[in-house]
């Protein structure tokens, strides 16, 4: 069995199939990811299953996932008092800008917890499982980890990691496109790329 198939089998044993969890998003094989972009938990739940975007022998189909993500956001009812919704969340926008400036460097977008909730406080205690994230860290061993938000930073600080860690404020507010793209360039410089 090749490494990607082994990762798929181990991940399936952790999250199940089907699943409402989103352990990560990447373009192609997660094993090619030199960088992890880490938050606390996904903010946008989706009807589609994580495995709907997984291609055995290839990996994750991010373009297809991204289309489904945007369609899902458009279908959701607006919160009271709101008249419109962004096509992508502020955090997703920052992640996309970082990815754009990473160039050939592959990043795995992941979270400490794989269950999606709009607000972290809505994540039930029994859904606060770190096993998928911990497995990905061990299986992939990224060279650089960009971690955003105080709670995610706190979790990462508890681990003994050989990766270069970059701690930044949460992506949900206060980021410009320029700052996000500069962060991607900083990661490339660390990797010598």
Image: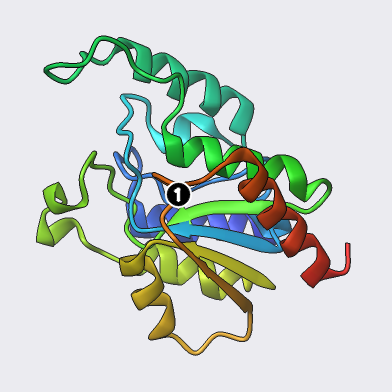
Residue occupying image coordinates x 66% and y 62% = 35
Number of labelled discs? 1
Residue occupying image coordinates x 28% and y 48% = 115
Residue occupying image coordinates x 72% and y 63% = 187
Does the image show residue 175? yes
Q: Is residue 83 above or below residue 60?
A: above
Residue 29 placed where, x, y %? Answer: 68, 48
Does the image show residue 1? no
Q: Nearer the viewer, residue 151 or 181?
A: 181
Name the quadrant of the N terminus.
bottom right
Q: Is residue 44 above or below residue 69?
A: below
Disc 1 on helix, strand or loop? loop
Quadrant of res 193: bottom right
Scheme by which the image is coloured: rainbow
Q: Is residue 165 left or right of residue 134?
A: right
Quadrant of res 127: bottom left
Residue occupying image coordinates x 47% and y 29% = 52
Q: Could you classify mark 1 by the number of other residues whose Cα lies within 10 Å: few (under 14), some (14-19), or many (20 or more)?
A: many
Toward the right, the furthest residue is: 193
Quadrant of res 154: bottom left
Q: Which residue is mark 1?
A: 171
Q: Is residue 39 above or below residue 21?
A: below
Q: Nearer the viewer, residue 75 or 132?
A: 75
Residue 87 placed where, x, y %? Answer: 45, 19
Q: Is residue 84 left or right of residue 61?
A: left
Residue 22 placed where, x, y %? Answer: 39, 44
Q: Nearer the viewer, residue 174 or 120?
A: 174
Residue 147 placed where, x, y %? Answer: 49, 65
């Amino acid at each position: 069995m090749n490494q990607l198939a082994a990762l798929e089998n181990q991940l399936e044993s952790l999250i199940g199939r089907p699943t409402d969890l989103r352990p990560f998003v990447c373009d192609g094989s997660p094993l090619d990811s030199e960088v992890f972009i880490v938050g606390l938990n996904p903010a946008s739940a989706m009807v589609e299953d994580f495995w709907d975007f997984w291609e055995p022998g290839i990996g994750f189909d991010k373009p297809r996932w991204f289309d489904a993500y945007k369609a899902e956001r458009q279908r959701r009812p607006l919160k009271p008092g709101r008249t419109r919704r962004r096509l992508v969340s502020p955090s997703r926008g920052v992640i996309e800008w970082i990815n754009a400036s990473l160039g050939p460097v592959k990043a795995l977008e992941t979270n400490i917890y794989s269950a999606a909730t709009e607000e972290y406080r809505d994540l039930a205690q029994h859904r606060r499982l770190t096993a998928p994230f911990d497995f990905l860290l061990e299986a992939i061993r990224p060279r650089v980890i960009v971690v955003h938000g105080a709670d995610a930073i706190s979790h990462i600080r508890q681990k003994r990691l050989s990766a270069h860690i970059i701690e930044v404020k949460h992506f949900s507010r206060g980021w410009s496109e320029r700052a996000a793209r500069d962060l991607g360039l900083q990661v490339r410089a660390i990797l010598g790329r």
